[in-house]
Amino acid sequence: MEFSPITLDAQKIFGQYMMRDNIALSDMNFTNCFMWRHAREIHYAVLQDTLIIQTCYQGSEPFVFFPIGAYSISHALRVLEVLKTHYRALGFGLHLASLNKQQASAIDSHFGVQSVAVREKFDYIYDVAELIALNGRKYHKKKNHLNAFLQEYGNFVFEEISAHNIPAILEAYEKWFEANPNKSDGLQFEYLGIQDALNLYENLGLQGGVIFIDGKVGAFSFGEVLACNLAYEQSDLAQTLSGESYINKSGKVVVMHIEKADSQYRGIYQAINQQVLQHCFSDCVWVNREEDLGIEGLRKAKQSYQPAFLLEKFKVSIQG
């Protein structure tokens, strides 16, 4: 079996197999894989008419996602048997990540293993209309921050990201990055990924916006609509105070890849979040704002926006 490194040329192959599945998770999205290829080795292969995405961190054994585009669970399990043999020949186990509950259950039953939920990888799903309106008590603080921004910077200009303003965005982001004294490996990899995404913005099919304040870039954000239809998922981690209003709600999903802002402007994060959804993605029902990585501050920030529910992810290792 031959795996190929992910390049822009792989975008069509990813799209071909993604169209067969109803994948709302952020991990398997082509842009996500392409942007983060600097941080880890990401390869792909086509096996028995399914797409296999393999990821490997330095010093670790590779892991894969569930076969994408499989015609049935039984088809996917046959593919996994082949992968198990492949990795065993290399001296590795078969490690799977970002499984949904149905996939994890099927693997547990077939291979006699026990998958585990990975809380820090759960994707946060929000109601787009609610994040645009910010009505009600639960959004009171967010609305106050947004109103403060509108009152102080009412002359701001919102533009959809395009070839016209990408140079200004790149220049501003480079200045923000250079001014950051704590450049972790993760931030440096993110910096490279954002540069790639902006330089290949149209090729990647991205949409987003930028806020200018007195002619300067104050914030920018971009994402893309996924080829899926997502229905409300009840789980122990759904927001119980508001969850009832989401039952029977389903529709298009946008995944937000990046959101960056100059924090000197009060309310700028609330403004860019609302403006991008309103101008670029108001026809979507849900927005996936990805995982919190187990970072306390990030988790608190994501929870403060009152997610409708979380998309659970599981992992499992199959030895021998």
Image (cartoon, rainbow, N blue to C red):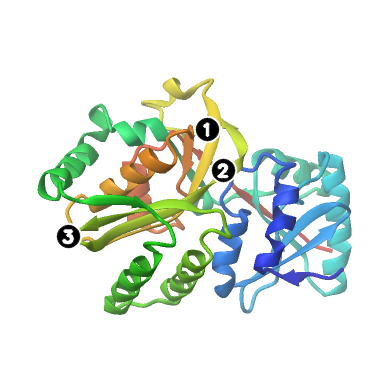
Left or right of residue 103: residue 266: left
Instruction: Decide which of tag 1 and tag 3 comes sooner along the chain.
Output: 3
Residue 214 is labelled as 3
Q: Secondary structure at mark 1?
A: loop
Question: Which residue is more in the foreground, 105 or 152?
Answer: 152
Left or right of residue 98: residue 106: right
Relative vertical location of residue 293 with respect to residue 249 in this rendering, above or below? below
What's the residue at 17%, 62% (across, down)? 264
Relative vertical location of residue 155 with respect to residue 216 in this rendering, above or below? above
What amino acid type is highlighted by mark number 2? Answer: Glu
* CB atoms of marks 2 and 3 within 8 Å: no
> Mark 1 highlights which residue?
235
> Mark 2 highlights which residue?
312
What amino acid type is highlighted by mark number 3? Answer: Asp
Question: Which residue is more in the foreground, 309 or 88?
Answer: 309
Quick one: quadrant of the N terminus? bottom right
On the image, the x and y values in percent for residue 131 come to 35, 36
